[in-house]
Image: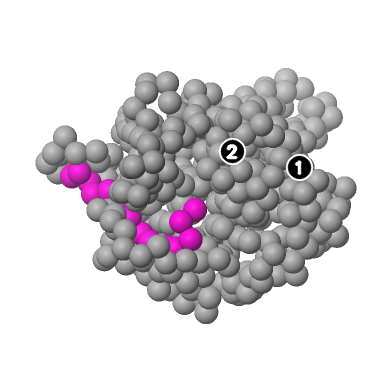
């Protein structure tokens, strides 16, 4: 993500065109109004505009203006990048020409409480030529998962999380005045595009406040994995402050909302980290989406070192009023095949176990409704899985007459 040189010295000089990508709240030209003494009328207009301006910033924290009035239609994302291995897929991503690219976690494998080591690991990523090219070509956003948080499967029990947070902000050039710096955890929200074609990207922090895992008894590990399901009412993934913040974000106007979770949300039957290890939290997010009637939600996730597309049907007992997709992309340069693994929500029984990245492309001009192409793309840049979705279908109103099984 572009930043002044002093904020990201290891990367070197940013591309001169990237200055417009800095995370800054929108500013309106009020100064000229106040400087011109044209009397009460213009003063009144200035006050009205100021109130509108404050209203824009009250709920949404950062609006990234790529260019004035530019519509965003190409968003890429990926996860699980080993900084000590070649990553030719970064060049592929550049060639796809994303306007925004999201790093969803495990962006480096630090696994340390030594912040000097973590900084060096980040610098390996930041100094890669293809990463630099991507940094110049697109707006880069990021959240973390366990390995760039600092320890495998860690949560709030990780002792160095404060230091890791600061290294995250440095590596991703998060400005000193960014709202996320005023709270514990790196969760953040961004909006792009004009009204009617607004995209909101909400990046969750599933690490900083997460209740520590409870180990399974040894005899259950082969069948159920290392971690036990926690039904304790106090067990949390996001923490109360982040939940309150998320509710506010879902009330902001947007036609498409992309919620980034470092771990899978829908897939619930495998043995690894997932939201369903905290079933009350998983249910809480589904209920929040129903209660806020937030339209246009698509979840993106990583972590698993393979890719798949999952869908919660509209008529599922847990449904939110329209189909909910969880598009999982992993890994950028360290894929693996876990073998047979159940996932009742998986589409077309499809998994991709080679290097990959996720892709969301919006056709805003499609009739009768804008359409989304939800894709998994391979090293050659071609889609290996595609799910076409009408944006109108991601609205509770479009399914109001459908019989619910709840």
Image coords of residue 78 (percent x, y):
54, 59
Q: In the drawing, does residue 406 fall left or right of residue 180?
A: left
Provide the secondary structure element on which disc 2 rests: strand
Query: Within 10 Å of the Cα at label 1, are there few (<14), some (14-19), or many (20+) other Cα atoms?
Result: few
Provide the secondary structure element on which disc 1 rests: loop
Q: Residue at x 66, y 68 (%)?
A: 85
Q: Residue at x 55, y 51 (%)?
A: 104
Residue 64 seen by the camera: no
In this rendering, the answer to whether 224 lies above or below 107 is above
The residue most toward the front is 219
Gap in angstroms between the C-alphas marked 1 and 2: 25 Å
Magenta span: helix, strand or loop, mainly? loop
| Quarter assignment of residue 337 | bottom left
Image coords of residue 249 (percent x, y):
49, 33
Q: Let me know if residue 311 is in the magenta part.
A: yes
Q: Mark 2 highlights which residue?
A: 188
Question: Considering depth in this image, is 318 or 83 the residue closer to the camera?
Answer: 83
Image coords of residue 352 (percent x, y):
40, 69
Image coords of residue 334 (percent x, y):
55, 66
Q: How is the image coloured?
A: one colour
| Quarter assignment of residue 370 | bottom left
Q: In the drawing, does residue 356 fall left or right of residue 135?
A: left
Q: Residue at x 27, y 65 (%)?
A: 349
Question: Considering depth in this image, is 394 or 380 the residue closer to the camera?
Answer: 380
The residue stretch that appears in magenta: 303-316
Residue 114 is labelled as 1
Question: Considering depth in this image, is 371 or 176 the residue closer to the camera?
Answer: 176
The residue most toward the bottom is 380
Quarter of the image containing the C terminus?
top left
């Amino acid at each position: 993500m572009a930043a002044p040189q002093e904020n990201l010295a290891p990367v070197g000089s940013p591309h001169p065109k990237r200055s417009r990508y800095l995370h800054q709240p929108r500013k309106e030209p009020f100064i000229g109004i106040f400087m011109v003494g044209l009397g009460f009328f213009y003063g009144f207009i200035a006050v009205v505009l100021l109130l509108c301006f404050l209203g824009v910033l009250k709920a949404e924290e950062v609006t990234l203006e790529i260019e004035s009035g530019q519509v965003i239609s190409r968003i890429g994302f990926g996860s699980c990048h080993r900084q000590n291995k070649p990553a030719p897929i970064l060049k592929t991503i550049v060639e796809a020409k994303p306007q925004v690219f999201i790093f969803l976690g495990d962006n480096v494998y630090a696994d340390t409480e030594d912040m000097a080591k973590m900084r060096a690991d980040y610098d390996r990523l930041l100094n890669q030529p293809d990463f630099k090219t991507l940094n110049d070509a697109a707006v880069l956003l990021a959240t973390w998962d366990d390995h760039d948080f600092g320890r495998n499967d860690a949560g709030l029990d990780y002792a160095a999380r404060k230091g890791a947070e600061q290294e995250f902000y440095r590596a991703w050039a998060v400005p000193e005045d960014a709202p996320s710096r005023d709270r514990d955890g790196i969760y953040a929200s961004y909006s792009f595009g004009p009204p009617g074609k607004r995209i909101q990207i909400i990046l969750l922090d599933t690490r900083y406040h997460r209740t520590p895992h409870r180990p399974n008894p040894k005899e259950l590990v082969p069948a159920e994995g290392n971690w036990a399901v926690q039904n304790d009412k106090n067990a949390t993934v996001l923490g109360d402050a982040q939940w309150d913040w998320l509710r506010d974000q879902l009330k902001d106007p947007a036609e498409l909302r992309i919620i980034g979770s470092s771990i899978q949300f829908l897939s619930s039957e495998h043995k690894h980290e997932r939201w369903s290890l905290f079933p009350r939290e998983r249910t809480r997010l589904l209920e929040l989406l129903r209660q806020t009637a937030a339209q246009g939600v698509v979840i993106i996730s990583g972590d698993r070192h393979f890719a798949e597309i999952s869908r919660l049907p509209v008529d599922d007992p847990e449904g939110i009023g329209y189909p909910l997709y969880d598009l999982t992309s992993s890994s950028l340069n360290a894929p693996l095949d876990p073998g047979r693994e159940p996932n009742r929500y998986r589409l077309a029984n499809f998994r991709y176990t080679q290097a990959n990245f996720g892709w969301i492309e919006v056709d805003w001009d499609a009739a009768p409704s804008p359409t989304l192409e939800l894709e998994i793309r391979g090293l050659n840049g071609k889609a290996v899985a595609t799910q076409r979705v009408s944006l109108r279908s991601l609205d509770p109103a479009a399914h109001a007459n459908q019989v619910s099984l709840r």
